[in-house]
Image (tube, coloured by chain):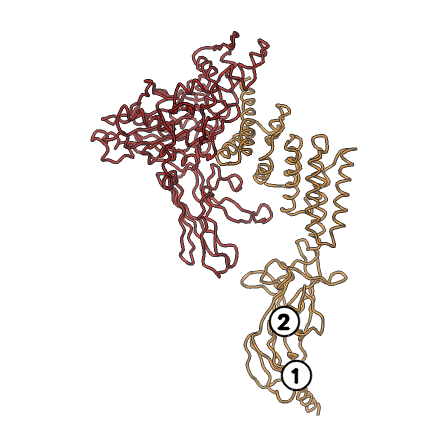
Chain colours: A red, B orange
């Protein structure tokens, strides 16, 4: 029987967990015996290397790429964001999907070396990711040769693990997941081993890495103000890695220091906390916002659950305690809960034939209820009453965010002109109920066959019924039906959509 | 003897050979009956008040009776128009729905086809309903009490287009007969001429208010000037050719006046706002705000004073909060908020420093939610940068509130 694994593809670190013979999730150690592997790729080596060694080279060697997860969904060659070390591969170019695929391929290789062929895998993604980033993740997994059929939101995976393994009391929990690059908050309802997601939100660009950057800038400032030494921000005299070491020290001590040439630069915890106070304010607002949306107060939450390496920072823990007015639960390793939950989810989705009787028995207890993470709609011409009846394109919502999966929504629209022979089937997504098309993403923009051809010679005001079905595997089936003629057009939006057209690209060799 | 003379006249009047007349129970059917005549028949119309049963609105019903003045077999259509005769020179009344408009104009027109081909000598003995006017839906040139003339015409079917904007010269081929009745009506809404005058005045006020926004940060910026210039050009070009010169002159004068005020005493906006409120509809108010936002974001920087002024305009114009936010977001998506003083962050983001703390917190949280969600959907890197900048600013403001609470 093949291995059933979960993969946490993180911004800074990734991890793999598998399901043992008895159905319990366990971490798969990498070749260095570590639980986690840096999501860092050195494209200059042959074969390409992944992990700790490239991570140490990051910022010193421009062939090393990191933090590419934050750009998943982009089809352009990866370009680091402002403030990150430059990335200039010696040959060719790499999209964020390519680089993620290299990391996944590396994880696959060492897992199969240790435990045999993988038969089922689940990769985790941040809860607030849109469809494109999810599609890109599925694509990267396929490119790496992983048998991935579904993906799972990171906080949901963490909640699943806690419910399955740690035996939580029944109630509502806030999963506070602050990783290296992203932040997610999910409120889940746990009853035994059943997990129901009530609401989620996230910040795409906020994590430990931002704290490292702020700390590095502080160190550079201190060089100048305390020692009169100006160091250019572009310089590699102080690396982000060194800043990260100081940050980790500050989690257990009041002071952390680093050497810059012959200078010793000391940063206090208080200084660090004031550096990141505005970021913490963002985390707080998001948590309050999710509770608001669910009409919940801190007293409705049994306890917050900490997930992600950055929750080790004392002021982050204080913040969680302050927002939810309760001590957080940290009974498992914050770096591992997501991947362990993903492994459980993989087993839940695996063919029963691939499970041992014990595995099947253990997993059969797990139930998960996800909700729609986005508003899905379409664009239509509507009169805006409050603007004096001005006609404008608006985003009309068909399925709301937060509905239980599977979800279904339907609305009728009408043709505008006499003799109108086509309508554009545009499917939009947004996280808030946005009306303005400028603030929504059209999911099927690049699909050429998005026109729905209608019979000719008909008057205006022909009814077109639009129905969306949001399925548990996050596939959305969209039907555009012309009521008078009975003609129908179906458009499918799915994280796995690109797989059908995907030609296996194996241009990368991994060690 | 008299009786005999009348009979003789009638005999010749109707051509003798068509002595049988048609009587119509309604406009589309006719029945043959022996002539019952009393005096010389003349074509005439009447106007009566009524209620339209389907629409439940008051109406004026127009009826016709009498001979059909034709010299050969002709199918006829009743065409009803309404013109305003209050002032010197009659002007058409407009109607808001296509169904009761002239083919090529917005002027009111009610057509009723009889569907019957009449022969010379035939006449309608009883009153036949020829058309309806809905006075409350008419739009005369000006509002208030107006004198309206209902004009009923008998037209040869297929030639209804000879009536233009409610008028048709006597003797026009196809026009068989015309009659008119007057009535008075109190119009609550503005007339179209009035609207036109007010629209033009609103354009001048918009320039005045936009110039005030331009000078809110202490100086008239060249790029802001270019926005006003382009806006004027757009309006002048879309005006009818005969009005362009005059409009351009007035608009330029409005710019010069505001500029002069700005340089000397400062631009006063109270009166302009009050007048704008008095004369403008929602769409015009939005146009003013849009121009102000365009001016504000012209130099890719927004000052808190500019934002404050526009917010004050929006409040005075009763623009719904969510609509203001939409406009604000739309016009500031590509603009960096100027970071002058920490205290200004609040105003830049749209918070009135006078608000109670709780209101500020809720507003801030909603702004954060909005921009954070847009980070997930905006595809343009520049727009994402702006969104991130906005998020960072919101974080800073919240941090200040937290610090205030702690202290």
How packed mark 2 is, by other alpha carbons closer than 10 Å (few <14, some 14-19, many 20 or more), is few
User: Which residue is label 1 attached to?
Assistant: B38
Whole-percent x, y for residue A54 in the image: 42, 20
Q: Could you tell me how far apart the alpha carbons at marks 1 and 2 are, in whole angstroms?
A: 33 Å
Q: Of the residues under marks 1 and 2, which one precedes in the sequence?
A: 1
Q: In what quadrant of the picture does the N terminus of chain B appear?
A: bottom right
Q: Is residue A230 left or right of residue A448?
A: right
Chain ID of residue with mark 2: B
Which residue is located at x 76 percent, y 50 percent? B245
The image quarter containing residue B347 is: top right
On residue B159, which mark appears? 2
Of A311 and B382, nearer the camera is B382
Chain ID of residue with mark 1: B
Q: Kindly state the secondary structure of the residue where label 1 is placed.
A: loop
What residue occupies the far left of the structure in this picture?
Answer: A357
Q: Kindly state the secondary structure of the residue where label 2 is placed.
A: loop
Of B225 and A3, nearer the camera is A3
- Do we see residue A474 in this rendering? no
Whole-percent x, y for residue A37 in the image: 37, 22
Whole-percent x, y for residue A111 in the image: 30, 25
Note whether B63 is above or below A227 in the view shown.
Answer: below
Which residue is located at x 58 percent, y 86 percent? B34
How packed mark 1 is, by other alpha carbons closer than 10 Å (few <14, some 14-19, many 20 or more), is few
On residue A107, which mark appears? none
């Amino acid at each position: 029987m093949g291995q059933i694994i979960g993969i946490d593809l993180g911004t800074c670190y990734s991890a793999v967990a598998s399901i043992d013979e008895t159905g319990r999730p366990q971490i798969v150690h990498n070749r260095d015996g570590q639980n986690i592997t840096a999501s860092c790729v050195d494209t200059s080596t042959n074969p390409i290397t992944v992990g700790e060694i490239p991570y140490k080279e990051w910022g010193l060697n421009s062939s090393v790429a990191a933090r590419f997860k934050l750009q998943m969904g982009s089809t352009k060659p990866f370009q680091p964001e402002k403030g990150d070390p430059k990335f200039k591969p010696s040959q060719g170019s790499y999209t964020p999907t390519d680089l993620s695929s290299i990391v996944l391929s590396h994880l696959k290789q060492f897992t199969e070396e240790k435990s045999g062929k993988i038969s089922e895998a689940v990769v985790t993604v941040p809860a607030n990711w849109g469809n494109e980033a999810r599609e890109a993740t599925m694509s990267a997994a396929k490119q790496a040769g992983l048998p991935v059929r579904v993906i799972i939101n990171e906080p949901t995976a963490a909640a699943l693990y806690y419910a399955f393994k740690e035996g939580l009391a029944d109630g509502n929990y806030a999963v506070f997941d602050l990783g290296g690059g992203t932040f997610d908050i999910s409120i889940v309802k746990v009853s035994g081993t059943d997990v129901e997601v009530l609401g989620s939100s996230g910040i795409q660009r906020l994590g430990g890495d931002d704290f490292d950057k702020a700390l590095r800038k502080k160190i550079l400032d201190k060089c100048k103000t305390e020692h009169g030494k100006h160091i250019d921000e572009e310089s590699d005299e102080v690396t982000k890695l060194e800043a990260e070491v100081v940050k980790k020290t500050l989690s257990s001590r009041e002071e952390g220091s680093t050497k810059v040439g012959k200078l010793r630069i000391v940063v206090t915890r208080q200084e660090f906390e004031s550096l990141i106070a505005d970021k913490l304010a963002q985390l707080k607002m998001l948590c309050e916002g999710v509770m608001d949306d669910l009409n919940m107060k801190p007293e409705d939450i049994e306890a917050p659950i900490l997930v992600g390496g950055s929750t080790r920072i004392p002021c982050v823990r204080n913040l969680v305690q302050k927002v939810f007015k309760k001590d957080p639960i940290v009974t498992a390793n914050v770096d591992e809960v997501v991947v362990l939950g993903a492994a459980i989810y993989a087993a839940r989705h695996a063919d029963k034939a691939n499970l041992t009787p014990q595995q099947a028995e253990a997993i059969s207890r797990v139930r998960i209820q996800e909700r729609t993470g986005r508003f899905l709609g379409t664009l239509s011409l509507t009169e805006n009453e409050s603007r004096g009846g001005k006609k404008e394109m608006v985003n009309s919502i068909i399925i709301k965010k937060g509905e239980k999966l599977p979800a279904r929504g339907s609305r009728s629209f009408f043709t505008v002109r006499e003799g109108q022979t086509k309508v554009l089937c545009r499917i939009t997504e947004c996280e808030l109920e946005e009306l303005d098309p400028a603030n929504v993403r059209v999911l099927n923009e690049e699909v050429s066959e998005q026109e729905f051809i209608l019979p000719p010679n008909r008057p205006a005001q022909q009814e077109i019924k639009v129905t969306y079905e949001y399925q548990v595997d996050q596939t959305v089936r969209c039907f555009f039906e012309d009521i008078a003629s009975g003609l129908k057009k179906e458009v499918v939006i799915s994280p796995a959509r690109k797989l059908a057209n995907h030609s296996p690209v194996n241009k990368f060799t991994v060690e | 003897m008299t009786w005999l003379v009348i009979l003789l006249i009638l005999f010749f009047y109707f051509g003798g050979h068509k002595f049988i007349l048609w009587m119509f129970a309604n406009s589309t059917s006719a029945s043959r009956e022996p002539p019952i005549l009393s005096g010389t028949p003349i074509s005439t119309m009447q106007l009566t008040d009524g209620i339209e049963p389907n629409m439940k609105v008051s109406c004026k019903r127009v009826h016709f009776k009498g001979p059909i003045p034709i010299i050969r077999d002709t199918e006829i259509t009743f065409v009803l128009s309404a013109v305003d005769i209050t002032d010197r020179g009659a002007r058409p009344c407009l109607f808001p729905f296509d169904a009761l408009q002239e083919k090529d104009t917005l002027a009111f027109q009610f057509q009723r086809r009889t569907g019957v081909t009449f022969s010379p000598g035939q006449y309608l003995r009883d009153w036949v309903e020829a058309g309806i006017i809905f006075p409350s839906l008419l739009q005369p040139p000006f509002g208030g009490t107006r004198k309206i003339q209902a004009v009923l015409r008998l037209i040869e079917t297929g030639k209804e287009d000879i009536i233009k904007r409610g008028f048709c010269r006597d003797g026009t081929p196809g026009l068989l007969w015309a009659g008119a009745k007057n009535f008075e009506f109190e119009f609550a809404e503005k007339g179209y001429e009035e609207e036109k005058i007010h629209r033009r005045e609103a354009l001048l006020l918009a320039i005045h208010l936009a110039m005030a926004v331009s000078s809110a940060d202490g100086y008239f910026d060249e790029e802001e000037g270019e926005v006003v210039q382009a806006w004027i050009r757009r309006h002048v070009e879309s005006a009818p050719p005969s009005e362009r010169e005059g409009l351009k002159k007035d608009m330029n004068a409005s710019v010069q006046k505001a500029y002069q005020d700005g340089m000397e005493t400062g631009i006063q906006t109270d009166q302009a706002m009050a007048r704008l409120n008095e004369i403008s509809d929602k769409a015009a108010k939005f146009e003013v705000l849009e121009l102000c936002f365009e001016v504000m974001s012209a130099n890719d920087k927004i000052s808190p004073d500019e934002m404050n002024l526009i917010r004050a305009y929006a409040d005075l114009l009763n623009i719904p909060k969510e609509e203001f936010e939409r406009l604000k977001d739309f016009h500031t998506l590509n603009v960096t908020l100027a970071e002058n003083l920490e205290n200004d962050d609040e105003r830049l983001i749209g918070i009135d420093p006078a608000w109670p703390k709780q209101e500020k917190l809720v507003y801030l949280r909603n702004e954060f939610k909005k921009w954070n969600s847009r980070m997930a959907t905006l595809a343009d890197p520049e727009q994402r940068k702006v969104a991130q900048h906005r998020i960072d600013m919101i974080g800073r403001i919240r941090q200040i509130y937290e610090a205030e609470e702690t202290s």
